Image: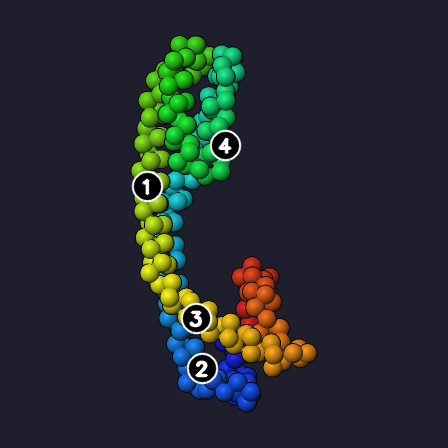
Amino acid sequence: MKTSFTRDRAELATRFAEFTPEYEAEFNTQLRKVAKLEQTLKLTEEQKQVTETLYEKADLVNKEFNFLSFYFKRADLDSGILTAVKKDLVSRNIEGACFKMEGLMQYVAENETVLVSKGMAAGFVATLETDVEDFTIKNALQNKIMNIKGQLHEDNAGEYKKLYTYITTIAAAGKIMYDGVGKVDEYTLGKVLSRMRIINSGKVPPSE
């Protein structure tokens, strides 16, 4: 829309007097300001690494639980709690998985003798305790980073609102001015957003 407005501003100004060169300059300044904020609010390398290791851990533990599920079946034990934990791990509900793993550890400890007789390693409960501790540390760090980013968004909500006002004003004027003309699509927010999604998907080169 920035490109369209730059091209059409003078023409739009013949019917919408507020679209002065100063207005365009202020709009561009606000765009740059928000673009800079967006760069700051992108996933940090630290969060990417924490998330990656957290989910890798979830996958490894979930795979290990396939063996535990086998032992449960061989011992004719109720696998409900184990199934629930595995579901949380797959859906990346780490907090839920940790909470349920406390109950799983207790259940495994109570039935350790029979489970060991079916192939489970002795002392497996200690392994589960280590897993829960690791999950808790990684998940807490991820949440801390996300909370910081959330606060940044909240602190800068006014800047986003200001840009939104510029965009909706220009879009509304453009739709009126170019009603029935092909380039009206350039001022129709739904179509602009749709085009952005296509470009970001890589299906259409950004230059098109």
**Labels 3 and 1 touching (C-beta < 8 A):** no
Question: In the rendered image of this protein, does residue 126 appear above or below residue 62?
Answer: above
Q: Earlier in the sequence, mark 4 or mark 2?
A: 2
Q: Residue at x 56, y 65 (%)?
A: 193
Q: Distance between the residues labelled 2 and 3?
A: 12 Å
**Secondary structure type for disc 3:** helix
Give the distance between the C-alpha atoms of the residues marked 4 and 2, in whole angstroms.
52 Å
Spot occupied by residue 88 in the image (x, y as percentages of width and height): 47, 34
* Disc ID at residue 163: 3
**Crowding at label 4, few (<14), some or many (≥20) Cα neighbours within 10 Å?**
some
Which amino acid type is shown beneath numbered disc 4? Answer: Lys
Give, as a three-letter code, the residue at label 1: Ala
Tag of residue 24? 2
Q: Which residue bears the numbered disc 1?
A: 140
Q: Which of marks 4 and 1 is nearer the N terminus?
A: 4
Residue 181: percent from left, percent from top: 67, 79
- Left or right? Give the position of 176 relative to 80: right
Q: Tell me the distance, in whole angstroms, between the alpha carbons under discs 3 and 4.
A: 41 Å
Count how many numbered circles sit on residues in the image. 4
Quadrant of the drawing holding the C terminus: bottom right
Which-is-in-front pick, marks 3 and 1?
3
Q: Residues within 10 Å of mark 1 (few under 14, many from 20)?
A: some
Looking at the rendered structure, the kind of residue marked 3 is: Leu
Residue plotted at (52% across, 76% down)? 170
Name the residue carrying label 4: 87
Q: Position of residue 132 (x, y in %)?
A: 35, 30
Q: Residue at x 41, y 12 (%)?
A: 111
Nearer mark to the viewer, of 3 and 4:
3
Q: In the structure shown, which secondary structural element does the residue marked by tag 4 occupy?
A: helix
The relative height of residue 158 versus residue 108 in the rendered view (above or below) is below
